[in-house]
Image: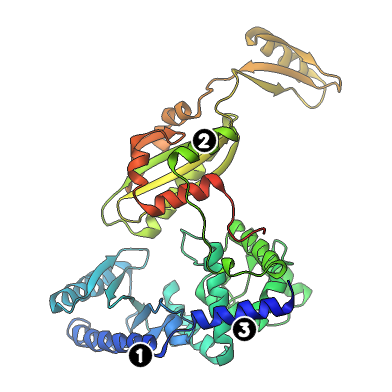
């Protein structure tokens, strides 16, 4: 592919992603409508100064066509703005009044770490978020208090012609499955995407840089000397990507990006420059049936466990995904300690009623015997090793051709499903009620969940594993 091919694809996608004037007009009309309504409600319930601002991609001019969701922030001049106050004095009265108005709004209360109100109206969504009215970045009380400063920074430093570049990069990240800082994704936030375009200038320039990234990768809007690089590595140790927030240098704007998301971004950047295609932005993939997926597992000697859950009513998505991943880490640890080879671990939820963990192992079981390696250094421990394994093992211990003591011991558990059932107390939480553990997609519960297209797509992604944007 030539530079000309990239230019053609990029130009075509820009046209597709750019919101129409009518979309923008309708979004701003809904904002003004909600702003007026909120003023009327809050002037009666909050005895503090407040102001209402539009934040997010619509305010910054970086939203995608068909995704004109609003971020409406209510900035309150009240220093004790804690979670309890927000729920009792903001979320509950605002949602109650919005429902009472009967304007066709679908109102949801979201009790995340920072509660807010979600409104669905006219094919759009609006998040109504209470925040502390911080006069400077040093005054912030909660993470969401930074948002107005982020909006102000992007509006100041992102050139108008770069808005299309941001849209391209957002859609690219969405297409490869790494867009969003929420726990579910562990990817690139909208704000980080905008910072990357401010840094590199264009979508293509970003790809050329990303294709060369190495962990830990440090990016900054300002030039860094070796001492500053060293400080950043120590301050944000253990993360794959570091991008100091230009609004608040104490924060890593890329903190949410997981190793998996970074690896996919590097791979996709390299692949797009090599073979540019619309499939990076608009991926499609064939969906196999359960029977075909079972056959795929069997033919590749893989063993799949599904841990199925019911979700407690009203549980916020952040809690669901956080607890799923926490359980997943415990499951992987138990399996590894008992000599099972964990190949993959994935998570799914409809964020309302159901959730699942997919655990993939190599082989359909383990032999009754497991190899054991003796002490690395020859000495007193050598005698202890031989005495221990002479008593209980079916084959006497030996010393191999390299002088390493070895033995074959009986394995306590050969079936991973039974192992997890033995550790059932590790598998549930107050928000996630365990339904069952099932192997290789054979239970009726799996077929029931497959009526949800998102579950069946997730199973396909988990088992088939092919990336629709890579290769010919």
Q: In front of the other: label 1 or label 2?
A: 2
The N terminus sits in image quarter: bottom right
Image coords of residue 350 (percent x, y): 36, 55
User: How far is the residue under mark 3 from the one under mark 1?
Assistant: 26 Å
The residue lying at 64 percent from left, 64 percent from top is 268
In depth, the one of 90 and 210 nearer the eye is: 210
Q: Which residue is mark 3?
A: 198
Q: What crowding class fits label 1: few (fewer than 14 Cα within 10 Å), some (14-19), or many (20 or more)?
A: few
With respect to residue 336, does 287 lie above or below? Answer: below
Q: Is residue 189 above or below residue 8?
A: above
Give residue 2's position: percent from left, percent from top: 74, 75
Classify 10 Å Cα crowding around label 2: few (below 14), some (14-19), many (20 and above). Answer: few
Q: Is residue 410 left or right of residue 324?
A: right
| Quadrant housing residue 25 | bottom left
Q: Secondary structure at mark 3?
A: helix
The image shows a total of numbered marks equal to 3
Rounded to the nearest angstrom, the CA distance separating label 1 from label 2 is 51 Å
Drawn side of residue 98 relative to residue 472, left or right:
left
**Callout 1: SS:** helix
Q: Which mark is residue 63?
A: none
Quadrant in which residue 110 is drawn: bottom left
> CB atoms at circles 1 and 2 under 8 Å apart?
no
Q: Position of residue 212 (x, y in %)?
A: 74, 67
Label disc, if present, on residue 295 of the rendered structure: 2
Q: From the viewer's perspective, is the residue at label 2 or at label 3 nearer?
A: 2
Residue sitting at x 56%, y 43%: 344
Residue picked out by circle 1? 25
Q: Residue at x 27, y 71 (%)?
A: 85
User: What is the secondary structure assignment of the residue under circle 2?
Assistant: helix
Indicate which disc, 2 or 3, sits on the residue closer to the N terminus.
Answer: 3
Question: Mark 3, residues whose alpha carbon is within 10 Å: few (<14), some, or many (≥20)?
Answer: many
The earlier-in-sequence mark between 1 and 2 is 1
């Amino acid at each position: 592919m030539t530079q000309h091919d990239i230019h053609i694809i990029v130009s075509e996608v820009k046209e597709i992603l750019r919101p129409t004037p009518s979309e923008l007009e309708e979004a701003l009309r809904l904002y003004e409508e909600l702003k007026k309504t909120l003023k009327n409600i809050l002037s009666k319930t909050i005895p503090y100064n407040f102001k209402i601002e539009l934040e997010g991609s619509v305010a910054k001019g970086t939203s995608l066509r068909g995704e004109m969701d609003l971020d409406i922030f209510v900035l309150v001049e009240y220093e004790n703005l804690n979670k309890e106050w927000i729920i009792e004095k903001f979320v509950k009265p605002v949602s109650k009044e919005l429902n009472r108005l009967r304007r066709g709004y679908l109102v949801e209360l979201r009790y995340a770490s920072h509660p807010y109100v979600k409104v669905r109206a006219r094919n759009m969504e609006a998040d109504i978020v209470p925040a502390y009215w911080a006069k400077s970045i040093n005054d912030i009380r909660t993470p969401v208090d930074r948002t107005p400063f982020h909006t102000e920074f992007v509006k100041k430093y992102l050139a108008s012609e770069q808005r299309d570049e941001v849209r391209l990069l957002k859609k690219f990240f969405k297409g490869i499955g790494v867009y969003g800082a929420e726990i579910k994704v562990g990817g690139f936030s909208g704000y980080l995407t905008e910072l990357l375009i401010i840094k590199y200038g264009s979508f293509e320039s970003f790809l050329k840089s990303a294709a060369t990234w190495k962990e830990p990768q440090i990016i900054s809007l300002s030039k860094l000397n070796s001492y500053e690089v060293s400080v950043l590595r120590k301050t944000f140790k253990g993360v794959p990507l570091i991008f100091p927030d230009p609004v608040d240098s104490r924060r890593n704007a890329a903190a949410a990006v997981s190793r998996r998301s970074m690896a996919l971004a590097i791979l996709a950047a390299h692949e797009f420059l090599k073979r540019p295609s619309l499939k990076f932005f608009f991926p499609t993939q064939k969906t196999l049936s359960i029977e075909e997926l079972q056959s795929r597992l069997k033919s590749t000697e893989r063993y799949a466990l599904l841990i199925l859950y019911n979700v407690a009513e009203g549980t916020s998505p952040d809690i669901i995904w956080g607890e799923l991943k926490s359980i997943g880490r415990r499951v992987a640890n138990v399996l590894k300690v008992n000599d099972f080879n964990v190949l993959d671990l994935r998570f799914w939820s409809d964020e309302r009623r159901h959730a699942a963990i997919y655990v993939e192992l190599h082989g359909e079981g383990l032999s009754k015997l497991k190899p054991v390696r003796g002490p690395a250094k020859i000495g007193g421990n050598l005698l202890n090793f031989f005495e221990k394994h002479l008593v209980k093992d079916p084959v006497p211990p030996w010393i191999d051709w390299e002088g390493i003591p070895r033995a074959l011991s009986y394995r306590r558990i050969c079936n991973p499903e039974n192992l997890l059932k033995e550790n059932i107390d590790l598998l549930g939480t107050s928000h996630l009620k365990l339904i069952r553990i099932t192997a290789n997609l054979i239970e009726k519960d799996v077929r029931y969940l497959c009526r949800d297209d998102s579950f069946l797509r997730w199973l396909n992604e988990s088992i088939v594993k092919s990336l629709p944007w890579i290769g010919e």
